Amino acid sequence: MKLDNIRLVLMETSHPGNIGGCARAMKNMSLERLYLVNPLYFPDPDADARAVGAIDVLERAVVCASLQEAVQDCAVVVGTSARHNRRIGNLVLDPKACAERIALESEAAQVALVFGREHSGLSNEELGLCNYLLTIPCNEAFSSLNLAAALQVVCYELFMQTRRTDTDSQATPQGELATGHEMDLFYQHMEQALVDVEFIKAKNPRKTMRRLRRLYNRAQLEKMELAILRGIFNAMQKLADRGR
Ligand code: SAH
């Protein structure tokens, strides 16, 4: 996920306060690239007031004359809408699914997320320029969020996706994984060590060993980690031996 490659596009926003609110919501989530297509009032003191500490995002905002112009260099365009027109037939994603999908795409290409007008959203023609649609699931009887509130939810999920990618890479094994044969020897060693310290009975190790197998199989042990654990078993066995 590369947040620098993601731009937020606001179509013909009529309340400048909303533009400021969006700038603030973006910066809170480390997104800084704001595009404004024909804003009714911009720059405007109300936009500055609502942006609070995100005036720099407003100052760097790119003002365009059309949606085509705002997304011309983008490989992926996502339209956001409270209700979706089935006739258009785009894939409809929720914010988290959308963040997952554009995580890879944003690494190498420009991505745009497009937000509609306060009163009328995005036109069918504009939705037709989009590769996907994003809808925030909510109360069906009252599904239209304030523009900046909708943008906040979307940006939050984009930001969360960057954190998921980071923790995923921490959880991903760094070294070579133990083979099935090494795991077999590991379980035999573990079982013997647990018998030696009298944690399980030689005659009936079944249930505990099955549970331990599940636990260690889930962990995807690397060769080095397996060696450490076998070292611990050796130490346990040595101590048990001395006790006898
Ligand atoms: N009256 C308009 C709603 C506009 S709300 C309509 O019925 O289409 C302004 C913008 O906020 C929308 O165009 C969309 O970009 C975003 N938005 C509001 N609610 C949303 C929701 N539930 N899911 C996705 N985007 C939403």
Image: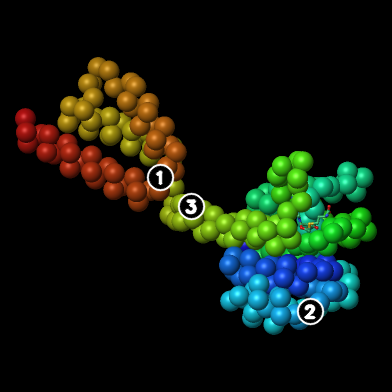
Q: Which mark is residue 221?
A: 1
User: Which callout, 3 or 2, points at the residue further toward the start of the chain?
Assistant: 2
Q: CA distance from mark 3 to mark 2?
A: 47 Å
Q: Which residue is mark 3?
A: 172
Residue type indicated by callout 1: Leu
Q: Earlier in the sequence, mark 1 or mark 3?
A: 3
Amino acid beneath label 2: Phe
SS type, badge 3: loop
Residue at point 43%, 37% (across, down): 217
Q: Is residue 62 above or below residue 118?
A: below
Q: Quadrant of residue 233?
A: top left
> Compared with residue 102, is residue 5 higher up or lower down, i.e. above or below?
below
Query: Where is residue 35, by image quadrant?
Result: bottom right
Quick check: can you spot residue 165? Answer: no
User: Where residue 213 sits: x, y (%)?
Assistant: 38, 32
Q: CA distance from mark 1 to mark 2?
A: 57 Å
Classify mark 3: residues with Cα within 10 Å, few (<14), some (14-19) or many (20+).
few
Label 1 Cα neighbours within 10 Å, binned few <14 / some 14-19 / many ≥20: some
User: Which quadrant would residue 154 be assigned to in this image?
Assistant: bottom right
Q: Amino acid type of disc 3? A: Thr
Query: Would residue 161 appear left or right of 234 to someone viewing this image?
Result: right
Q: Are marks 3 and 2 in contact (CB under 8 Å)?
A: no
Instruction: Identify the residue shown where x is 88% and y is 76%.
Output: 65
Task: Tell me where residue 230 appears, x and y as whole percent.
Answer: 27, 42
What residue sits right under mark 2 in the picture?
42
* Residues packed near mark 2 inside 10 Å, few (<14), some (14 to 19) or many (20 plus): some
